[in-house]
Image (cartoon, helix red, strand yellow):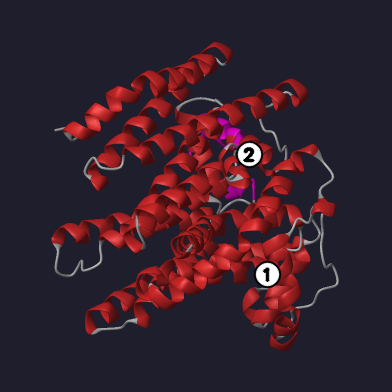
Amino acid sequence: MWASGEMREMYFANKKLYLPLVGVIIGLISVLFPQFIVISVVIIITIIFAFYFITFNEKGKAFHIFRIFLIALTLRLVICLLLSLISYFKRGHPFFLGCDDYRFSIDALGAAERWRKVGFVSVSDYLPCYGGDGYIYLLSLLFYFIGAYTFLPLFINCCLGALTIIFIYLISKKIYNARVASLAALLLSFWPSAVLWSTQNLKETSAVFIVYLVFFLFSKFRGWLQDKKRLIYFLITLLPLALLAKIRSYMMVCLILSIVIAKLFFVTKKRLIFSLLGIVILIMAFHQNWFYINDIFIYRFGISPIKIQFFELLNQYRYYRIQEGSTVFLPGLKIASLSSFILNSPIVLMYIFFAPFPWQVFKASQLFAAIEMLIWYLLVIFAIRGFFISMRYKLKESSPILVFLVLSIFVLFVEGNVGALFRHRYVIWPVLHIMISVGLFFHLEKE
């Protein structure tokens, strides 16, 4: 059966509302862009996959999350379309931000064209800064096999951003309950930066999608040593981890470390085997990316990272980061030693969690950030409460995502630009949304 009787009945009862809505969006795209066939196919496949995925995991009892998914997907498609049109008529290309999103596309188009002329060669032959960037390779392959459809990556990211909501729901429900999961899914669906980054040609959306896909799969293969079916989940997890290592290597490191550390908290003989296996995978990933990281540091700083101390390495990288962009904060900050790192942590954490401040918003494109921060200021107390509630009552179940949150915040210490911070903070918002939902749930239950 393709779904339970209750699921089918609810689906067909609501199709008069949702299917025409999706049809209008697809029809509008079809009229405006010649790329409509490929884009429509991607959207339709995403919707079908989401429906079957939810049905399979929830046994037909969670139609509301499919409804949230459809609304979130439609919102992202509409905003993506509007922003792309604004940029297209203003600049001649569909990339609203006009920075990395534009550069990624141009580099990928160049690589695809080069492959057509001389065959497959390494991108690093002519793009030394991006030679190890998996996202460039993915775009290049997309443009090589399907064509120079520059709108397509934008709509693929819309789909990935909406699918991430389903993973957040399932992860939250397994750790807490359905009400917490639904609230977390709603927050992520309408969170301004989550919507914005899902509509842009940037690697954050695909990286975040992979991170929470792995967390979901990890929740499925607990006890995999006793269950061959769960062993399949474990083997499937290796592929997105390898992909994440090429898209955002630091996220892959934080992800594996969070799972390994969480397992070591509650170590048994079998969990120790799992943790050691995770460490082996981590070492292999480091080995795979070490030469690329070394080349990048020599290219940018003129020095190999192995020749300088850890905190000096962080300080050097932060110095590099503040050379870009127009929203630099704390330009004189030094974190070159453990003591300076600790002393400066409060002010850096203040920026990580609360920047951009209202007085740092100057352009219309920063409106998403201004709206988001005002909402966040109201909800941060619930996030803090949810964090400590999870530590007290659900430490064993929530430890992987909590450790990932802490490690990701640590990585953000190297950011010295408000714009880049706003973008790279996207990876921790899903966990913060879960914490907000936990805090709100306990608050409402107490009331």
CB-based contact (under 8 Å), mark 1 and mark 2 = no
Does label 1 or label 2 sit earlier along the sequence? 2
**Type of residue at label 1?**
Phe
Q: Which mark is residue 413?
A: 1
Which span is picked out in magenta?
109-127
| Number of the front mark, 1 or 2 | 1
> Is 171 situated left or right of 114 in this image?
left
> In which image quadrant can residue 180 be found?
bottom left
Q: Nearer the viewer, residue 4 or 303?
A: 4
Q: Nearer the viewer, residue 243 or 70?
A: 70
> For the point 51% across and 70% down, which residue is it?
387
Q: Position of residue 173 (x, y in %)?
A: 35, 56
- The answer to whether one can see residue 51 in this image is yes
In the picture of the structure, the residue carrying the numbered disc 2 is: 107
Number of disc labels: 2
Residue placed furthest toward the bottom: 339
Q: Position of residue 270 (x, y in %)?
A: 22, 79
Q: Position of residue 223 (x, y in %)?
A: 21, 69
> For the point 29% across and 74% down, which residue is it?
274
Q: Quadrant of the N terminus?
A: top left
**Type of residue at label 2?**
Asp
Residue placed furthest toward the front: 447
Secondary structure at numbered mark 1? helix
> Does residue 6 sit above or below 234 in this rendering?
above
